[in-house]
Amino acid sequence: MCIRTGIVTMSRKLAYRNLPQLFLRAREELLCHFRPIITHFGLTEQQWRILRAIGEYDQLEPREICEICQILSPSLTGVLSRMEDMGLVTRTRMEEDQRRVIVRMTPKAEKLVAELGPLIVEQYKVIEQAFGPELIQELYEVMDKVIAAERGPIPQIKLPPRKNWLTDET
Amino acid sequence: MCIRTGIVTMSRKLAYRNLPQLFLRAREELLCHFRPIITHFGLTEQQWRILRAIGEYDQLEPREICEICQILSPSLTGVLSRMEDMGLVTRTRMEEDQRRVIVRMTPKAEKLVAELGPLIVEQYKVIEQAFGPELIQELYEVMDKVIAAERGPIPQIKLPPRKNWLTDET
DNA sequence: GTTATATGGTTAATATGTTAGCGAAGCTCC
DNA sequence: GGAGCTTCGCTAACATATTAACCATATAAC
């Protein structure tokens, strides 16, 4: 407590650094080298993620894209319909199950990926040069350890009773 | 080329795994354990990032918040004005430089952080238990290596002449 | 001192993220 | 075979991300 002002100015620094935020920053550190390439072809980052995924699996259903590309279903709906308008993908309902949908690339998108893909790889090589191959390798390993769900379920801490922080003035 | 269909189905799998996407997935793997805590207090993830930052630095200018919290300036404008409406922060123009602004927490926000912060730390401990302290340590180290700009500027590959992929039908 | 330039925050327009909930199609169980 | 439940994609409402451009203020150049 400050003697002069009477205000408690203890360090509100938490014991742990903001890990999700570090991920965000590290991701941006990488992505900023790819963004110019992607936008050069008139795509958004998400659109490229999706095209890359379909290119790899040949065809995918929306919920598969959601999981692979880390895009939530409501977002995907919009992204896909825009990509459909751009003539990049087609959406066709499955015969067996009228709920499900198949997403495929158009020939135009195939050509686009055929041009864009190698450039992405080229940029990866440049980055690998700068970072050092060991760091890249290390990155893949650590990421996989975090993602690999080979651990028990992580419990959620008990939450205190809900107060109306944002309405009460007390 | 497939003999039956005549369609070229070569593997369009790139030589490098999608690293930014791995970051995204790993980040989500962590964040999903904190999100319930944050929303329990009626905050969004970004709002908590900002409160945590201000709590640590006592007061910040918008552009500092942008850099620390990885939020772009136009986004921040909206987030801050919403937080102002919620009575969480105050924005005051600087006397010396009428362009600049100082962002501070309100007492209400101070109390909120005082309750929320320890819960976040608690959850970190739980996660550390499940992940193992070594992995957490390893994470911090690798992230810092990626972020630390102690390397030369990373060159951008040369881009081919721009074609109108999205308008031409050729 | 006035013009040129740079900086800090903002607005505008569009795309995506996030949560809740809906509606149709498929499944289960009785 | 119909009630209840689940799955799948979607809509709606709001918050944020992203790019471009704007405006006021400050600084540099002359």
Image (tube, coloured by chain):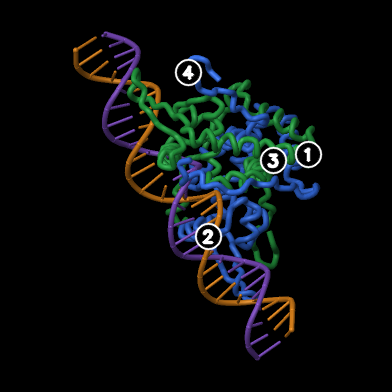
Chain colours: A green, B blue, C purple, D orange
**Circles 2 and 3: CB atoms closer than 8 Å:** no
Residue B77, numbered label: 2
Q: Considering depth in this image, is B38 or A56 the residue closer to the camera? A: A56
Judged from the image, the secondary structure of the residue bearing numbered disc 3 is helix
- Residue A111, given in percent of the width and then of the height, sits at 54, 35
User: What amino acid is labelled 1 in the image?
Assistant: Gln
In the image, residue B13 sits, relative to residue A3, either above or below, namely above
Neighbour class for label 2 at 10 Å: few (<14), some, many (≥20)? few
Q: Chain of mark 1?
A: A
Judged from the image, the secondary structure of the residue bearing numbered disc 1 is helix
User: What amino acid is labelled 3 in the image?
Assistant: Gln
Q: Residue at x 63, y 33 (%)?
A: B18
Q: Chain of mark 4?
A: B
Same subunit, labels 1 and 2: the answer reads no
- Residue A118, given in percent of the width and then of the height, sits at 65, 36
- Residue B119, given in percent of the width and then of the height, sits at 59, 40
- Residue B20, given in percent of the width and then of the height, sits at 63, 38
Q: Earlier in the sequence, mark 4 or mark 2?
A: 4
User: What amino acid is labelled 2 in the image?
Assistant: Thr
Mark in front: 1 vs 2: 1
In the image, residue D30 sits, relative to residue A168, either above or below, namely below
Mark in front: 4 vs 2: 4
